[in-house]
Each structure stands twice: as structure tokens, then as C-alpha cells.
């Protein structure tokens, strides 16, 4: 539970019309004082609801030479209660003039600033009357931001070396206030009419189409954009640049354009086609027309996150949008398609229907993440997106297994807490519990419910319960104006089903009661299954990595269980509402597998002989289970070792079957559980055991590696698996792989990089090449001059895997400087160096030495900061390192990050690593020794 700042607890809410009246002195310890020394008339982070904005008239003039901007905003206000004070947001803006524009004429308002809450108070000497509308006008100026949020500066180099400047916006979550004064909370929806002044050499784009351009003195132009639909401030966007664009029109008549820097416009065709296809899909799927006349997708050279869903103008990292059919990999194609699907899903989930406040961010992000997979499964079946969904749930469980996790829906107040909500819990857990609910209700009922939700709350704000109500009682509702055909067909089918075929009774289907257990408490359940004859005993508890079992007490979920058995591959269902229960099988069976395809967000422990029967099944007939079922068993068994439910040798015995595995999900999950074991050892002095562990993994996958062709053939999943396996084999010095990669790198180098390498093998080739100083330097030269974003990404990863410490240090310094290597990629570089056994010390030193620069550039609470904190430190497993990490973060103040959740997460992770090593190392050693004394590869 996050505690609200002390000020909010000690300082009561002032009556709306109290103006600057002093509150009761007995309740005040630290009243907010404005910059001029006066008492500021508002004491909360959240704005009062006395006034709501209806319309913004915004004029912005950025100067890309002096790197600053000026602006004027006129805001039409609706007064909800008599007041003489208008409270709104402004951050680091110089406010030069504020007027109240009333029918009786314009008059100046007194302005108070309270920077701590990013607030302005506009004081009127007469009361603003309830029910009337007023207009305020503010003139302002500021520098273009040096960070990646607000209205910020971006730049790129042309192939001739010229530096070109552009300006772009990133307002989510609380940064619109840094670009213009506004009511910067998601529930204050309004219409925006935007004008942008620019030079002739630039273009301007915004949320809406341009309606006209006016010539101004001094060779300037002013672009006027159409008025937006009603929307939140965080979705406003504008870009001033020299971009070029390509366009197409969807079947529904929406103009789609992709914008990029001129020399990369030839890499936009794939994104354009994908956006057309996906917007048409959503238009039909949601049964709600996309409400704007156009949708732009812009590739911004400097961009902190992956992409942003601004309504009508989505913005992306260049790697998230640009695709070269000859140079981009299968995983690039999957990644770009997913990110476009995510942002376009937001045009409905998030933009049309928006969460009331950031505590329910998951209603935006969980849905958009979930819809990536639903949409691509239908529109791009060849991408086999289903092969990758499980990984999202595993990633969410990583953080959700710690006591520092948070409920999907969590109270947040200040901007840092809000930024911290953009994490694996909101995105990935959100998507996984939606997937579980869809499986529980049936896809048809779920689709009807979410369409009802979107139609019912269009242009409004929602909370959790609105979604649950929309998904309840699908067949007794008549509020679907359109799309009723789906509803009618589904409900008549339900009526004709016999009672016995419905697996739950109607009184069980309280969607809200079920889902509150998944959204209002943190963590997830571990279901223990014990089979005794026909009897199956079930119990649930919280899965928690801790040495304090009391922290796991008091949790109860309503769990939609699914299972198959050796006697029946029909999916059976059971809603577990209590701490324990019993179900009966029609006959005795050899094995049961619960959580079919891991469609539920929970782990399963098979007590008694349960794991033995699963291991026998995998060793003799692993394809009796789906690849997702196999991946979930691998993940579950190793995670159960961490909390002492399963012995390590049991998990290792299960892993032996992987020598026969060929599917991407179980193979990568096998790596995901086994590789971290030696990654812990690399950061301690235990070379013998470390090398034994590495040899075991290489042996396990040797046959699969040997079968890989060094080409680009096969499905997306097969190609991604090939890249993964060859990279692993080369990094682990598997001789045939190193020889082949060395030969190809030398040929490529001899051709001065002109030889065409199969895309899927380039990572393996580059990693081997970057091992020598000459190879590394050659790779860097090619990196510097390449215009292909995906190629640059692979080169950068390879350069970060080298053992050359001076190069690793130089890479981090260059990324911080931002001239040759983009600072947006610095988090990836620092984490890559820190995972590298030759770089983990310099990565940690670099993070500490540059901490204050990093939190200024990337913003406190951002995903980038938490990614660096956990990525740099989460493979430590010694008490010395734990003390070092605790000491550094303990020396910070709240302003510099001492309260960040990621610090608690990394400390817990290191403690868990220490416990794991203390408990399991002797067993691991004995098991590997025993294995080495068997016949070579006897299980392979």
C-alpha cells in the first residue's frame, strides 16, 4: 500500500469557494506556500472539481534554433460550484499574462504558483458563479525539454553528417502541464483546437487534420488544425519536423499516414499496411467506428518508451515502426506489428473510454496488451502470436511474487507514483487476467461484454466496476444498440444448451466478486493438487518469495481452474472459491494437468506422486501436452524450488526431457529457468560449478542447435528460435557455432560489410566478431553509418556482449553523451553491460556515478529507471553486494528516489538469490556431478 504524502494527511481540503481563507491552524503543519510567499489556496495533489474545462484554444510557437517555445491558451470553463479561484496545472512554464475573458470585458487575474504540486491558482476578485461559463487566457513560454517528456527536442544525423532538430510531445502521464497550462488529469476531458507556428522548411502535425495555413510576418506559417473530439490532456500531441510521409486509406475511409525522417521513409511500407489492416480490424471488432478522419504514425528519433497512443497521432521509437524487408528479422516484424496493434487498440481502450484516475491504468494498458494478441491472431495468423503470450504472464509473475508487488488497481497520488504504475503488473498481469476471464466466460460472451463497455462509456471515464458490470448478465441486457446480432446468436445458443453443459451455475457468475480478488489484492495463487485415487484435493495459498511466511497469509482468490487428464483431453472446469476443496474424477488416471495452456494466472504444485507422473509423461510422450502446457510446467516446477515446495533435483530431472523439445515456448522457458542459475554464479567466484552448469545446458540443446540451418527459412517462431539458439550456442563457445560464425564474420568484414548475411543469424555472427578489438571497432563503424534501425539494434547488443571492458565502459559513456549512440538506448546498454560477467562491476559503478543525471533525463518513477535498477543488480547473490546496493539506495532522499518501488523489488530479489544459493548449491553440485559420471548424453 502506498502512503499518501504527509501534507495530504495533515492538511484538510479547503471549501471550494474559500479562496485564500486560512484553514483551522490546529490541522495545519506545513501549509502550501506559493513562490511569492502567499498561502496557496489548495492543498491537494488532485485538482478540485469546482471547475471543469470544456474547450482549449491552444497556439504554440516553437523555435528550433533557440530551442524554446511561446504559447497562448484560452480555456473555456464550466463552473460547478461558486468559487473565486481557478486551480490548474503548470510545470516550469513562465506565465506572463493571465486574463479572465468575461462578457463584461477582459480583466487580469492574480496568479499564484506552487511548483511542488505543479499548480497555478488564478484568483478572481469577483465570484465565478455556478452554472456559468467563463474563459481564461494565459500566455506562457519555456525551453524545449531536454528529457523525453513534455514538449521536447529531438535530433538526428543525415547520412552527410548534418544534425537536424525537431520538436515532439510526450504527455502521458503528467507532462502536458510542462507544455501548456491545463487541467492535467484524465477525467478532465475537453476539446482542443490547436494552431502551430513554424518555419517553411518544417511541417507540423497534430491529433487532427490541418484545415488551413496562414502566412505570418517574418516568413513564418501558422497551421490551423481541426478541433479534436472530447479527450484527456495526456493524449494531445504535436510534432514540428522535416519528416516525409506515405499514406493509404482504410476500408472505412480513414486516412493513415506514416511519418519518418526523409532518409528512412523507404522503411515505412510495412507499418503503413499493418496500420491500415489493424485499424479496419478494430473498427469491425469493436463495432464502433474510429471517430477521427485520420491516424498518423510518426517515428521519432529520440523516444523513451516504445510508443504512445495520442489520439490520431501515435508516436513510436524508430525501431518500433521502421522495417526493411531485406535487413529486419522475424522478431522485428512481430515486434513492430504488436506495437502498432497495441497503440491502435488504445484508440478505443484508453482514448474513447479512459480510466477515471491512474490507479486503474490497467484498464488502458492491460487491455491494449491483451488486444495485441487477439488482433494479431486473427489479422496476422502467420506470426503465431500465441507462441509468445505466456511469456507476458511469466514476466508479470516475476514481480508479482515479491512482497513489494502491488494490486493491479492501486491508489496513487503524485507523479512519481503514477509513473511507477507503468509496469509489468499493469500491462502484463492486466492482459493475463483478461485472458483468464475471456477463457472463463467464453470468447463470445467476453467480446459482447467489452463492446457493451466501450459503447456505454464512450468519451467518458471509468473504474474497474464499470467493466465488471458490462461483462455480467450478457443475455439479460438490452443496451447494445448495434452489434445485437452477436448477442442474440450467442444468447439463443446458451438457452438451447442443456443445463448440464454449463459448467458453472448462474449464482457463481458474479464477475465482479471473482475479478475483485485478482485486481484489488497483489500477488497470485499457488494451487496445490493432490490426487488420491479418484479424489483430487485442492488448496490455494499466495505464491510468495520470502523468508517470512506470515506475509502470504490472508489471501484468497476465486480461481477458474481448468484441467485435463490422461483419460480425457476435454477441458474440465471448476471454480475454486475457498481455501481448499475436493473434486472427483470419473475414474482413476495416470496424470492430471491443471491450468490448461496456462490460461489462468496461477501456478500449480502437484503434491505426492504428482510431479513424478508429469516427468514420466514428458520423458515418454511430451507431445501429449500442448507446447504452452509444457512451458508452464517448466516455469512452475523451477519456481516451486524457490519457495521450497519442490526439490531442485526434481526440477532438473524434468528439464532432461528438453533434449527432445523443438517448440519455441518450452525451449525458451527452459533457457529462462536454467540460464539464471549460472548467471548468479558468474558474479561469484565458482568457475567449476558455473562451467558444469553451462555444459549441461549446451548438452541439453546440442541436437536442436545442430539441426539449425544458417538461413532465413521457416515460420516466424522457427526463425526466432533459430536466432535464439545460435546466439546462445555462440556465446557459450559451442565449437561448431563459433567456427561458422567466425567464418561468416570474416567474410562480411572482408566485403566491408556489403555481403548479405541471413538476417536471423546476424546476432550470432556479430557477437563472435565483437570479441576482438578489431572486430568490435569494425562493427562500431558499421553501426555509426547504418540507417537500418533493426541492424543497429543487433550490432549494439553484440557490442555489449564483448569481454573487452574498455569498450563496455566507452559504450555507456557514449550513450550518456548521446552524440554517436542515442541516450534513449542507455538503459539497454547499462543493463546489457551489467549482465555481462566482464561488465557487471562497471555497470553498477556507472549507475551510481550517474544516478542524478539519469533520473533527470528519464524521470523518477519511469519504467526506464526501474529497468536499470533491477537490470543492473538482480543477478547479485552475496550479502556483500546486498549491503552495497542497500547502502547506495539508502543514501538517497525521497526527491532522488529513495522511495521507488523498484529498489524494494531489487533488494527482495537479491535476498531471494542469496537464499536460493545457500539452500540449493550443494544439491545442484551433486546432481551435476552424478550426471557427469553417467554415459555422455545418455538422456539426449
Image: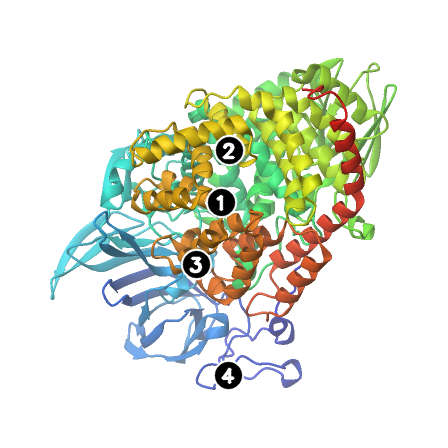
Which is closer to the viewer, label 1 or label 3? 1
Numbered disc 3: secondary structure: helix
Residue at the extreme right? 532
Q: Which residue, given by chain and number where applicable, does mark 2 sit on? A: 727
Query: Looking at the image, which is closer to me, 833 or 371?
Result: 833
Residue 319 placement: quadrant: top left
Mark 4 vs 3, N-terminal side = 4
x and y percent of residue 652 in the render?
A: 74, 30
Mark 1 vs 3, N-terminal side = 1
Numbered disc 4: secondary structure: loop
Residue positioned 66% across, 46% down in the render: 680
x and y percent of residue 84 in the render?
A: 44, 77
Crowd band around label 1 with a 10 angstrom C-alpha radius: few (<14), some (14–19), many (20+): many
Residue positioned 65% across, 22% down in the render: 659
Q: Which mark is residue 802?
A: 1
Query: Looking at the image, which is closer to me, 639 or 448?
Result: 639
Mark 3 vs 2, N-terminal side = 2
Which is closer to the viewer, label 1 or label 4? 1
Is residue 359 in sight in this rendering?
yes
Q: Which mark is residue 935?
A: none
Give the Cα distance between marks 2 and 1.
13 Å
Query: Looking at the image, which is closer to me, 614 or 313?
Result: 614
Residue 12 in the image: above or below residue 707: below
Q: Which residue, given by chain and number where applicable, does mark 4 sit on? A: 39
Give the Cα distance between marks 3 and 2.
26 Å
Residue 796 placement: quadrant: top left
Crowd band around label 3 with a 10 angstrom C-alpha radius: few (<14), some (14–19), many (20+): some
Tell whether 459 sits left or right of 659.
Answer: left
Tell whether 779 sits left or right of 367.
Answer: left
Amino acid at each position: 500500500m502506498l502512503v499518501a504524502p504527509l501534507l495530504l494527511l495533515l492538511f484538510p481540503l479547503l471549501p471550494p469557494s474559500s479562496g485564500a481563507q486560512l484553514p483551522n491552524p490546529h490541522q495545519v503543519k506545513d501549509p502550501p506556500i506559493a513562490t511569492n510567499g502567499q498561502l496557496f489556496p489548495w492543498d491537494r495533489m488532485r485538482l478540485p472539481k469546482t471547475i471543469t474545462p470544456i474547450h482549449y484554444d491552444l497556439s504554440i510557437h516553437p523555435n528550433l534554433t533557440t530551442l524554446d517555445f511561446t504559447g497562448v491558451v484560452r480555456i473555456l470553463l464550466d463552473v460547478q460550484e461558486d468559487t473565486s479561484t481557478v486551480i490548474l496545472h503548470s510545470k516550469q512554464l513562465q506565465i506572463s499574462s493571465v486574463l479572465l475573458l468575461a462578457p463584461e470585458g477582459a480583466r487580469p487575474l492574480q496568479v499564484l504558483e506552487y511548483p511542488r504540486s505543479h499548480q497555478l491558482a488564478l484568483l478572481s476578485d469577483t465570484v465565478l458563479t455556478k452554472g456559468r461559463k467563463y474563459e481564461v487566457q494565459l500566455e506562457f513560454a519555456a525551453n524545449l525539454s531536454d528529457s523525453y517528456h513534455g514538449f521536447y527536442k529531438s535530433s538526428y544525423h543525415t547520412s552527410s553528417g548534418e544534425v537536424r532538430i525537431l520538436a515532439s510531445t510526450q504527455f502521458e502521464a503528467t507532462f502536458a502541464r510542462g507544455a501548456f497550462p491545463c487541467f492535467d488529469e484524465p477525467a478532465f476531458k475537453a476539446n482542443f483546437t490547436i494552431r502551430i507556428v513554424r518555419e517553411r522548411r518544417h511541417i507540423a502535425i497534430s491529433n487532427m487534420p490541418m484545415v488551413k495555413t496562414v502566412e505570418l510576418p517574418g516568413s513564418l506559417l501558422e497551421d490551423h488544425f481541426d478541433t479534436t473530439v472530447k479527450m484527456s490532456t495526456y493524449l494531445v500531441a504535436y510534432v514540428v519536423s522535416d519528416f516525409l510521409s506515405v499514406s493509404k486509406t482504410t476500408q472505412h475511409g480513414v486516412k493513415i499516414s506514416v511519418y519518418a525522417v526523409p532518409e528512412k521513409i523507404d522503411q515505412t511500407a510495412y507499418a503503413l499496411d499493418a496500420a491500415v489492416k489493424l485499424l479496419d480490424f478494430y473498427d469491425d471488432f469493436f463495432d464502433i467506428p474510429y471517430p477521427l478522419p485520420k491516424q498518423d504514425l510518426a517515428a521519432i528519433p529520440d523516444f523513451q518508451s516504445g510508443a504512445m497512443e495520442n489520439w490520431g497521432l501515435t508516436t513510436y521509437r524508430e525501431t518500433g515502426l521502421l522495417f526493411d524487408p531485406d535487413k529486419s528479422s522475424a522478431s522485428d516484424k512481430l515486434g513492430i506489428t504488436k506495437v502498432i496493434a497495441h497503440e491502435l487498440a488504445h484508440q478505443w481502450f484508453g482514448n474513447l473510454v479512459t480510466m477515471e484516475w491512474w490507479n486503474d491504468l490497467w484498464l488502458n494498458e492491460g487491455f491494449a496488451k491483451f488486444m495485441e494478441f487477439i488482433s494479431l491472431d486473427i489479422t496476422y495468423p502467420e506470426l503465431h502470436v500465441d507462441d509468445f503470450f505466456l511469456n507476458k504472464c511469466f514476466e508479470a509473475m516475476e514481480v508479482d511474487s515479491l512482497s513489494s508487488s502491488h494490486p493491479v488497481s492501486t491508489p496513487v497520488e503524485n507523479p512519481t507514483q503514477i509513473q511507477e504504475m507503468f509496469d509489468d503488473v499493469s500491462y502484463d498481469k492486466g492482459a493475463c487476467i483478461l485472458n483468464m476471464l475471456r477463457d472463463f466466460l467464453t470468447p463470445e460472451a467476453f467480446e459482447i461484454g467489452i463492446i457493451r463497455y466501450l459503447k456505454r462509456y464512450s468519451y467518458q471515464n471509468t473504474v474497474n466496476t464499470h467493466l465488471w458490470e458490462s461483462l455480467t448478465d450478457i443475455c439479460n441486457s438490452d443496451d447494445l444498440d448495434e452489434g445485437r446480432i452477436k448477442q442474440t446468436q450467442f444468447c439463443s445458443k446458451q438457452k438451447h444448451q442443456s443445463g448440464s453443459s454449463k459448467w458453472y451455475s448462474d449464482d457463481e457468475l458474479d464477475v465482479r466478486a471473482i475479478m475483485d480478488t485478482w485486481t484489488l489484492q497483489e500477488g497470485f495463487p499457488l494451487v496445490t493438487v493432490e490426487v488420491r485415487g479418484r479424489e483430487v484435493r485442492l488448496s490455494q495459498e499466495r505464491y510468495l518469495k520470502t523468508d517470512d511466511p506470515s506475509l502470504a497469509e490472508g489471501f484468497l482468490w476465486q480461481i477458474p481452474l481448468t484441467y485435463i487428464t490422461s483419460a480425457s483431453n476435454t477441458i474440465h472446469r471448476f471454480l475454486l472459491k475457498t481455501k481448499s476443496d475436493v473434486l472427483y474424477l470419473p475414474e482413476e488416471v495416470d496424470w492430471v494437468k491443471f491450468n490448461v495452456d496456462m490460461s489462468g494466472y496461477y501456478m500449480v504444485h502437484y503434491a505426492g506422486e504428482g510431479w513424478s507422473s508429469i516427468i514420466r509423461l514428458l520423458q515418454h510422450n511430451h507431445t501429449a501436452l500442448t507446447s504452452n502446457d509444457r512451458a508452464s510446467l517448466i516455469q512452475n516446477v523451477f519456481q516451486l524450488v524457490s519457495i521450497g515446495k519442490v526439490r531442485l533435483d526434481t526440477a532438473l530431472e524434468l528439464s532432461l526431457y528438453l533434449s527432445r523439445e523443438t517448440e519455441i515456448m518450452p525451449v525458451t522457458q527452459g533457457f529462462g529457468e536454467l540460464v539464471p542459475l549460472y548467471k548468479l554464479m558468474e558474479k561469484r567466484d565458482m568457475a567449476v560449478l558455473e562451467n558444469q552448469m553451462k555444459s549441461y545446458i549446451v548438452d541439453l540443446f546440442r541436437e536442436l542447435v545442430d539441426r539449425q540451418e544458417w538461413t532465413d527459412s521457416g515460420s516466424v517462431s522457427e526463425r526466432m528460435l533459430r536466432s535464439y539458439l545460435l546466439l546462445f550456442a555462440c556465446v557459450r563457445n559451442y565449437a561448431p557455432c563459433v567456427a561458422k560464425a567466425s567464418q561468416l564474420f570474416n567474410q562480411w568484414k572482408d566485403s566491408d560489410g556489403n555481403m548479405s548475411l541471413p538476417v536471423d543469424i546476424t546476432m550470432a555472427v556479430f557477437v563472435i566478431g565483437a570479441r576482438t578489438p578489431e572486430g568490435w571497432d569494425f562493427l562500431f563503424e558499421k553501426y555509426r553509418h547504418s540507417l537500418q534501425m533493426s541492424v543497429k539494434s543487433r550490432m549494439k547488443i553484440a557490442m555489449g556482449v564483448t569481454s573487452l571492458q574498455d569498450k563496455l565502459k566507452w559504450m555507456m559513456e557514449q550513450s550518456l553523451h548521446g552524440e554517436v549512440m542515442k541516450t534513449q538506448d542507455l538503459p539497454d546498454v547499462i543493463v546489457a553491460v551489467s549482465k555481462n560477467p566482464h561488465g557487471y562491476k562497471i555497470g553498477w559503478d556507472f549507475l551510481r556515478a550517474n544516478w542524478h543525471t539519469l533520473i533527470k533525463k528519464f524521470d523518477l518513477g519511469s519504467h526506464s529507471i526501474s529497468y536499470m535498477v533491477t537490470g543492473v543488480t538482480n543477478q547479485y547473490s552475496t550479502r556483500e553486494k546486498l549491503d552495497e546496493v542497500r547502502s547506495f539506495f539508502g543514501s538517497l532522499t525521497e526527491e532522488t528516489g529513495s522511495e521507488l518501488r523498484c529498489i524494494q523489488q531489487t533488494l527482495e530479489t537479491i535476498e531471494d538469490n542469496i537464499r536460493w544459493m545457500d539452500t540449493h548449491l550443494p544439491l545442484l553440485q551433486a546432481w551435476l556431478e552424478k550426471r557427469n559420471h553417467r554415459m555422455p548424453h545418455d538422456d539426449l
